Image (spheres, helix red, strand yellow):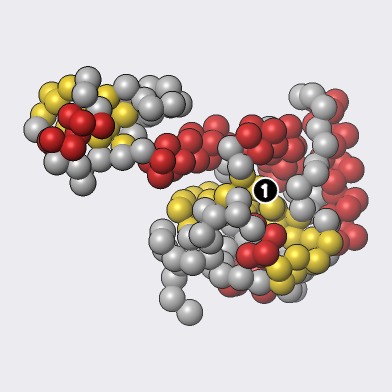
Amino acid sequence: MPSLRLGSIAPDFEAQTTAGNIKFHDWIGDSWAILFSHPADFTPVCTTELGEVARRAPEFAARGVKLIGLSANGLESHEKWIKDIESYGAAEVGPTNVQFPIIADADRKVSALYDMLDAVDATNVDAKGIPFTVRTVFVIDPKKVIRLTISYPAQTGRNFDEVLRVIDSLQLGDKHKVVTPVNWKKGDDVIVHASLNDNQAKELFPEHKAPLSYLRITKSPF
């Protein structure tokens, strides 16, 4: 199977989740979606990550983004683990309620489909020696196109501020003819898209500045 790249159609699949059986493309519908994988249930880094996503779910929902996790265990294990995630999060951080589905992928079918299995860390395996997943993030748009992939090693927790930042950039660029510069954050200045000629740039962004002929900066259209 060819590698999944930015611009690839996210593979469709059917799976059991903590919210019932789903067909992935139908579940996404007309929304954006984030699919993010976890090596295994009852693991410490994963517990902190899922709690963080649960607490920040309203921020994703405000951007029209659905969330779905994946871990290489069955549903019964997932249900028990969610109780740990919620109790730890509530005690250490704040109210934590895991509402988004978590895919049961004990057989690694979805993990293999999305090429998320660990090929580096020899200790990141189950009792049978089958690899667990790494910490992969897929951002998928309403057309089911993969717009972002990030893979972290099992030992490193993800930064969901960065995931939100990229979503803001993608959605802004889709709506307006702009791209975002280094370290950009929502509300910062943006760059006029290279596909616009100078006359088009002046028409759409009359107050833009051009410190270089190919670098045209304007206020954010937000």
Write down the quadrant of residue 8 in the picture.
bottom left
Q: Residue furthest bottom?
A: 1
Is residue 176 shown to the viewer in this render?
A: yes
Residue 19 versus residue 86: which sits nearer the camera?
A: 19
Categorize mark 1 by other alpha carbons within 10 Å: few (<14), some (14-19), many (20+): many
Residue labelled with disc 1: 67
Could you tell me residue 28's position as x and y percent? Answer: 64, 57
Residue at (48%, 79%) from the top-left corner?
Answer: 1
Q: Quadrant of residue 57?
A: top right
Secondary structure under tag 1 reads strand
Q: Is residue 48 visible?
A: no
Frontmost residue, 199 versus 139 = 199
Q: Is residue 59 left or right of residue 119?
A: right
Position of 45 relative to 217 (above/below): below
Give x and y (percent) for residue 52: 70, 35
Q: Position of residue 137 (x, y in %)?
A: 56, 51
Depth check: give the residue in front, 123 or 44.
Answer: 44
Name the image quarter holding the C terminus.
top left
Horizontal side of 172 relative to 43 (left or right) equals left
Asked if residue 157 lies left or right of residue 172, the reply is right
Residue in the image at 69% along x and 60% along y: 27
Q: Residue at position x 63%, y 65% from top? A: 25
Residue 90 location (% of width, % of height) = 84, 28
- Amino acid type of the residue tagged 1 in the rendering: Leu
Which of the pair 108/58 is nearer the observer?
58
Residue 78's place in the image compared with 64, above or below, is below
